[in-house]
Structure formats: structure tokens, C-alpha cells
Amino acid sequence: MKARDTVRARGHPLIRGTHRTTFEVTKDETLTETGDCIIGIGADKGAADLDPGFKALLSDDRAVLTTRLRVGDETVEVRSRGSAAFTLDHPSDLVWRRSDFVSDRTVGIRSDRVAASIPRGFIEALRRGEELVVELEVEVPETS
């Protein structure tokens, strides 16, 4: 079974993308220099706003999440896992984590990319305020 959702956000001059264990997209309109995991602001969705069918599939320990981050012609693909522990009810934030840590903001664990591993050209485009499109696809393998 598969489900998809899309989140639209934008960059900001203070985006640093240097965090070594997470990356985040937020509905917040402002950013400070301490937000080194944030790669997109002004998002049209937080975790609570994701499609209910998508959230149901993502809240499965077998779920595999593929996230495609797009800025202009550049795409960065991130592979993560879902979890039955996800609540997906944070009103403004979406966070992908390298670890297994789960909070109400977490949409992906065991991610193969974090803010610091996103190509610097991609981060520079975000620093110019370009649009960020976050395409999410979750798949849960069929059981027989």
C-alpha cells in the first residue's frame, strides 16, 4: 500500500542546514540563527495537517518513507522509516531524524540524510528564499 502528500514551503536567508541529526520544515514565518536544522519556513502543512490516509500508513513500523526535496531543478531524495509510535499531531513542524527518537513533530526516523548532508548548492538556493516542495511517499509492504 502507498500514500502520498505534498508540503510547500520556502527558504530564508538564515537557513544554515548544518544540523547533524535532523532536518525540519515548519509553518513558522521566522527563523533565527539557532535553527540550524530548519530548511524551509512558511510551510502549508505541519504534521497534524498531513492527509489522514498518509498518516495511517506512516504510523506502521514497516513503513518506508521516501521524501523528495525539490528546489528549482534540483532534487534531494531522503529515505526514512515510519513508526507505530508516531502521533503526527504537531500543528506546525515536520522533522526527519537520523535516530529512532519520536515526538509529535517526527515524520521520519532512521533517515539517510540530515540537514548537514544536503548539498550546499541546494542550501544556497534555500537561502535565496526559493520555493521548497516536499514530496512524501510512504509504502507499507503487503503481507501475505
Image (spheres, helix red, strand yellow):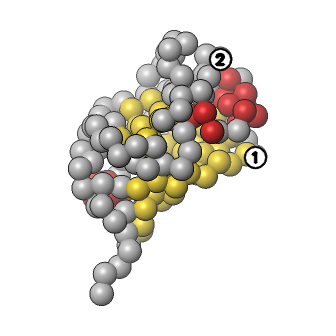
Relative to 135, say whether 42 is above or below. above
Q: Quadrant of the N terminus?
A: bottom left
| Residue 39 image-quadrant placement | top right
Task: Say which mark, if any, is on residue 13.
Answer: 2
Residue on which disc 1 sits: 73
Q: Position of residue 11 (x, y in %)?
A: 61, 27
Q: Amino acid at mark 2?
A: Pro
Specify whether residue 49 is in view: no
The foreground one among 139 and 98 is 98
Report if the CB atoms under discs 2 and 1 are less than 8 Å apart: no
Q: For this view, does 87 lie left or right of residue 79?
A: left
**In x, y percent, where is residue 45?**
41, 38
Dot 2 crowding, Cα within 10 Å, few <14, some 14–19, many 20+: some
Disc nearer the start of the sequence (2/1): 2
Taking the image as shown, residue 45 lies to the left or right of residue 117, namely left
Q: In this view of the protein, can residue 23 be seen by the observer?
A: yes
The answer to which of 26 and 84 lies nearer the viewer is 84
Q: The residue under label 1 is which amino acid type?
A: Asp
Residue occupying image coordinates x 60% and y 28%: 17
Q: In the rendered view of the protein, which quadrant contains the C terminus?
A: bottom left
Q: Secondary structure at mark 1?
A: loop
- Residue under the point 36% across and 55% down: 82
